[in-house]
Image (cartoon, rainbow, N blue to C red):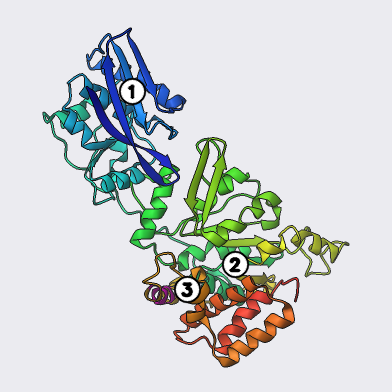
């Protein structure tokens, strides 16, 4: 007889079902785990042996073989402890085999028999629901996994509680979802004095999920503006919240099982490695671009990032996903983020201020901005110069709009896009539209089309640049509540495109 339990192995955010087969046969006493386990999985036998020993359960003096099927799928992580223990208990007739085979289990065992929290409970619950099984996981993961309403989640604190539940002697109740994390008190856009053009660009970027480059002298307010972007973004939809939380679950970033409806904002330092930005390292973990999925990736001092790191952003920006390829892993993560980059105009930072700039103007600025390659620069929908604010203006009272007012316009524009793209699963905002769909929704009126044609010919817009102008123009029209893309919408979109253009 072979007893069976079920668990998962993670391939990106996808949790693939793994069948844990346990057989006890005649032979010299041994405990072997096969099926391409990593070191943590291989060590499970010692944790299982010790945990069962604390419960006065002696292993038979026979050969114990545990197979993790499919055998060619790499198995990594300590969450295999619990399913291995359950399969073994079913094989030696301590637990009903049908009860064990009817659940998906994951959890790390302590030597005393306690169940320790593990990463990935949320995607594991999604996989269990797909297979029509309940999920057994540690108590520390129950609130997180319970967010998948289609899956019954049982969260014991110890192996003994799991045995009591499956044997029917002490059934446990189902876990309840954790608290929805409330939105943190953000900084208000009204605190920003001046910079009306930059604030308008942030509003357009937020409304259509467009990528934005802010260029200005040190202290002009680039980081201050970016810090106020979350305050004008709409909350995550239920589907977006689940997608984002699954990635954060794998990274261990969910706080006590609670998920957040606020859009993530990641701010990597310019010394971050490629693995930190795009993903990788041990187990090919998600990087900053994936942790910013459905949110914002803010990269300050953009030209200071290593050139290789910057160039790896080009494909994720276009496709909305990143493939992390390693010798023993080939993992795909979603990364549909909004890139907000900030840069000084030159190395010294004062290119636009002759009295403060260095002696190498304009070569200083050309060399510095050329660290951003042409293909990468072409992917920014909006490019804005952020001039220094005059000292006299800093003493004036704040007169700008509050973040709540701007957020209402952004939410209305996003609602228009939700209705527009309701039948397109892969398209959620204007920035995602392409091909015939883009032509159908963003073709300007005759005057706007003529203006765009003249600009494209005069400044040599690439095909990508041409389409990005159309997307931005469509967003500007949505903010104004206009069904048609007017000449003024196209003109404003072009003005953001030609700023900092190397062809202008």
Which residue occupies the foreground of this view, 392 or 491?
491
| Residue 162, position as x, y percentages in the image | 21, 30
Residue 412 on the magenta segment: yes
Res 219 visible: no
Residue projecting furthest to the bottom: 447
Q: Which region of the structure is painted magenta?
A: 411-418
Res 409 quadrant in image: bottom left
18 on left or right of 209: left
How crowded pointer 3 is (Cα within 10 Å; few <14, some 14-19, many 20+) is rated as some
User: Mark 1 highlights which residue?
Assistant: 66
261 on left or right of 280: left
- Indicate the secondary structure of the residue bearing disc 2: strand
User: Mark 3 highlights which residue?
Assistant: 402
Magenta stretch secondary structure, dominant: helix
* Image quarter of the N terminus: top left
Earlier-in-chain disc, 1 versus 3: 1
């Amino acid at each position: 007889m072979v007893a069976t339990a079920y668990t998962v192995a993670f391939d990106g955010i996808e949790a693939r079902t793994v069948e844990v087969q346990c057989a006890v046969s005649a032979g010299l006493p041994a405990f072997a785990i096969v099926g391409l386990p990593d070191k943590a999985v291989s060590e499970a036998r010692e944790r299982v042996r010790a945990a069962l020993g604390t419960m006065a359960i002696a292993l038979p003096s026979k050969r114990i073989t545990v197979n993790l099927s499919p055998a060619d799928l790499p198995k990594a992580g300590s969450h295999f402890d619990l399913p291995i223990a359950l399969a073994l208990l079913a094989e030696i007739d301590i637990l009903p085999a049908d009860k064990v085979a009817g659940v998906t289990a994951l959890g790390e065992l302590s030597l005393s028999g306690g169940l320790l929290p593990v990463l990935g409970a949320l995607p594991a619950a999604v996989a269990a629901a797909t297979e029509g099984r309940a999920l057994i996981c540690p108590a520390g993961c129950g609130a997180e996994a319970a967010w998948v309403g289609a899956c019954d989640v049982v969260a014991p604190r110890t192996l003994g509680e799991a045995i009591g539940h499956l044997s029917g002697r002490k059934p446990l109740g189902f876990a309840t979802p954790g608290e929805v994390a409330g939105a943190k008190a953000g900084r208000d856009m009204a605190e920003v004095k001046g910079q009306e053009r930059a604030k308008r660009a942030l509003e357009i970027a937020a409304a259509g999920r467009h990528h934005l480059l802010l260029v200005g002298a040190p202290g002009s307010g680039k980081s201050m503006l970016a810090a106020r972007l979350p305050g004008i973004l709409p909350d995550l939809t239920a589907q977006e919240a689940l997608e984002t939380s699954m990635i954060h679950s794998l990274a261990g970033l969910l706080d006590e099982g609670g998920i957040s409806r606020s859009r993530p904002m990641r701010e990597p330092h310019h010394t971050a490695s490629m693995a930190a930005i795009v993903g990788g390292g041990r187990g090919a973990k998600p990087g900053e671009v994936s942790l910013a999925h459905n949110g914002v990736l803010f990269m300050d001092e953009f030209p200071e990032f290593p050139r290789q790191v910057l160039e790896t952003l080009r494909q994720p920006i276009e496709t909305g996903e990143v493939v992390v390829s390693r010798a023993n892993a080939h993992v795909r993560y979603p990364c549909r983020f909004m890139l907000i980059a900030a840069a000084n105009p030159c190395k010294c930072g004062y290119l636009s201020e002759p009295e403060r700039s260095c002696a190498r103007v304009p070569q200083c600025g050309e060399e510095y901005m050329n660290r951003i390659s042409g293909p990468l620069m072409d992917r920014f929908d909006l490019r804005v110069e952020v001039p220094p604010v005059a000292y006299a203006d800093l003493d004036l009272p704040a007169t700008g709009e509050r973040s709540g007012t701007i957020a209402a316009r952004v939410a209305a524009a996003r609602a228009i896009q939700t209705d527009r793209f309701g039948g397109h699963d892969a398209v959620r905002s204007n920035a995602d539209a392409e091909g015939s769909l883009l032509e159908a929704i963003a073709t300007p009126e005759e005057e706007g089309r003529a203006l765009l044609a003249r600009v494209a010919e005069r400044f040599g817009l690439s095909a990508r640049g041409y389409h990005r102008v159309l997307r931005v123009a469509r967003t500007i029209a949505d903010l104004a509540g206009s069904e048609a893309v007017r000449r003024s919408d196209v003109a404003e979109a072009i003005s953001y495109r030609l700023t900092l253009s190397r062809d202008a």
